[in-house]
Image (cartoon, rainbow, N blue to C red):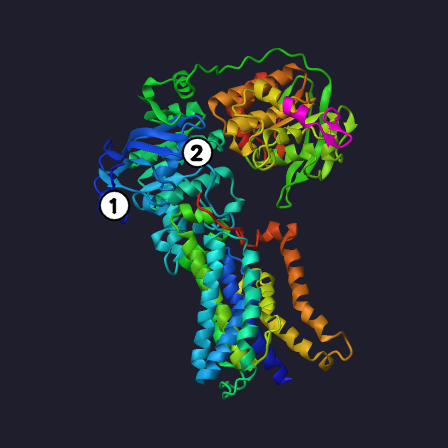
Amino acid sequence: MIAFLIRSLEAAMIFTFAGLGELVDQRSGILNVGLEGIMLFGATLGFIAAKTTGNYLIGFLVGIGIGALLGLLHGFFSITLGVDQVVSGMGIWIFGFGMTTYIGNPHTGPLGLERLPTWFGISPFFFLALFMVVAVWFVLTKTGWGLNIRSVGEQPSVAEVSGLKVARIRYLCVIFGGMMAGFAGAVYGLYYNPVWNYNFLMGWGFISLALVFFSMWNPYLLFGGAVLFGLLWQLSLNPQMFFPGLASRYIWRMVPFAMTILVLIFISTNWFRSRWGAATPEALGKPYHKE
Amino acid sequence: MPKVKDVEPIELHGDIWKHITPGEVILEARGITKRYPGGVLANDHIDFKIRAGEVHAILGENGAGKTTLMSILFGLIQPDAGEIYVRGLQVRFRSPEDAIRMGIGMVHQHRKLVPAHTVLENILLGHPKSKGVINIKDAEEEVVAIAERYGFRVDPRARVWQLTEGEKQVVEIVKALYRGAKILILDEPTSALTPVETERLLESIETMTQDALGVVPFITHKLPMVLAISDEVTILRRGRVVDRLKTAEATEQILAQKMVGRPVIFDLKKPDVTPGKPVIQVEDLSARNNKGLIALKNVSFTVREGEILGIAGVAGNGQHELAETLMGLRPAESGRILFNGQDVTHLPILDRWKLGMGYTPAERTDVGSIGDFTLVENVAMNYYFDNRYNHAGFLDYRGLRQLTERIIEEFDVATPSPDVKIQTLSGGNLQKIILGRVLSREPKLIIANLPAQGLDVGATEFVQRKLLEARSNQAAVILISEDLDEILSLSDWIAPMYEGEIVDILPAAEAKKDIIGAMIAGLHQEH
């Protein structure tokens, strides 16, 4: 039972890393649906780097680095070229899926390094995730940078005439989002599941993406959602443990997505809007061109 | 073009703004010229000087080059030639940030505020103090202090989407002043204000001039405002400065004539029309706004043939919801609408058009037209269902084209051909074609939502004349307007609206501007 919970929290912390990056990204108005691709890259290249050098740190740095590069690529497509962000993100996912399968294939199998240490069974990454949640919340709501990010994601033209550089802020956010996703992937491949196989991420990028919508763009709700989704994922691995004979694991894996859709319906009701205003960043997914 | 050396903008609180004496030139433009890629010469060697402590109005019709000039002064676009001097120092604004740092503040007509943010967040956005952790309490106090200095009241914690147009303008002004603006550019400052709010703004501008700020309102219409507010006027026409004069020497007639280039008739002759039978009867009508709140509350009125009912009010008091509910674009919550005695409350929109209702929406580019379609196709949108142009599902494009040509002719639309995309038309011409396609159907009822909003003097006069013509032809007209002068000069009956209710319905002959002004500001409800 304890193992079940710990394993759930480990999944939650990975969802949190990737989700927080995407949350900042989306708050600045850029939608990156290629999260799965970036995480796959982070996991695979991080895995290979750590395996060949025998050094975990290099593995994580490579994961973060490739994430930053892919974030930059998505930024170039969606900010500089102004292409449809869903198309660009999907491209990154398909690219990530294909490339990592090709690059990682010779390295199929376990990492073969000593496991990273834990603290009473809990990974130190979990505490880092908690810290990041508070930090992102603080920056977004209490600082001028956060105000700039949120403004750029709501009304870029307003930010522009207020003297902000919209493109630069969006680039920084999309690169941050990529770094977080790459790091989340590296944590997955080097800690959570250090046995490489093609597509071994099994859709965790998409769960993290759904989590951002589920959270209504609030870091604390995102963390709560991450824990919930982590529990559901763990449950889906072993549904007969709690509900013998009730539904297959694939149904359980669908639950986070179904819940996200319910939240999306909820926040678009008149009831919600008239009380809380619009939760979605107004300019999300819309390319911005100077007047 | 002489090579201009980039002058690094100096931090605002540096030396440049020290020791200003009232009357000294603080901003000078010399030979500002801008040609757009299409070949349009928007600004042609424009010169002017702004002095400290003076209000210098820039006047011009739509298309006279005001927007271009404003954008250049605020760093949004770069001029092809010409120089700008701030306190004698030559500057080049590569972005709004440069302009802001040199002391230019801009209050936009289409508010540049983030609706989801608080007032304080909007004011802090882009401010040097909002780097790093924001001290909200200090900032709130400073903002309120600045607002009070100029007689404004702001609630820093309110969300901008909850504010009225007038309150939003106050936020923009306070934002510019808090940022340290010494030259305040105001784009159509009174176009969305009630008379009471206008009065208050004029007092605030008075205080600003006492503080040796330069105030530069850009104005298209509302000539009385120019006379009330300014010390000096520069008049633009077709991208050029046609005249510059002291306001004390000007009259409304002179200004209008110089702006338009021909004499303008201000007093529209309203012919005597004997009202006929009721066309539309509205009983206890209520409707919700986009936020799901009741925005139209138990409204009742009747309009007869040959009558204009003027709905007066400030934006956001239910007029928009009224127009959309009458036309079927918005469901009625309760109450009913009778059109020629027939209950149309739940009738689809198309049936209402077929029965003889006509609507010209306030949002000309979003609801009123499809920018990528030609004039002919846009005209067809009011005719595709008409048997004269629709033969068993096939559109008669030749007929529609002839019809469009007739509308272009009769409504004096400036366009190279009926086959160009409608988005190439200017605001005034777009409104003329929208009005033309509705009036050419000879509707029994016309709902005109802000028909002259944002139009220049010439186009405004034209649109108003056409509405009066429709009235003479025994049409019933519901005129929704935020301009009290327009309401007073056109209407037979006046219905001021406040917070979704019709305060009273007065015969125009007995209506007084100050009373209606008070009613739409919510100050006259008790009777």
Q: Which residue position is annotated with label 1?
A: B7
Work out whether residue B145 can be spotted.
yes
Tell which subunit mark 2 falls on: B
Residue B234: assigned label: none
Residue at x 45% of width, y 43% of height: B112
* Residue A154, position as x, y percentages in the image: 50, 51
Tell which subunit mark 1 falls on: B
Q: Is residue A259 above or below residue B279?
A: below
Camera-near label (1 vs 2) is 2
Residue B38: assigned label: 2
Residue range highlighted in magenta? B387-402
* Residue A276, position as x, y percentages in the image: 58, 53
Image quarter of residue A265: bottom right
Callout 1: SS: loop
Question: In which quadrant of the rendered image does the N terminus of chain A lie?
Answer: bottom right
Using residue B448 as the reference point, say whether residue A152 is left or right of it: left
Question: Is residue B390 inside the magenta stretch?
Answer: yes
Residue at x 47% of width, y 25% of height: B456
Q: Which of B133/B444 is in front? A: B444
Q: Neighbour class for label 2 at 10 Å: few (<14), some, many (≥20)?
A: few
The residues bearing labels 1 and 2 have C-alpha atoms spaced at a distance of 30 Å
* Residue B242, position as x, y percentages in the image: 35, 22
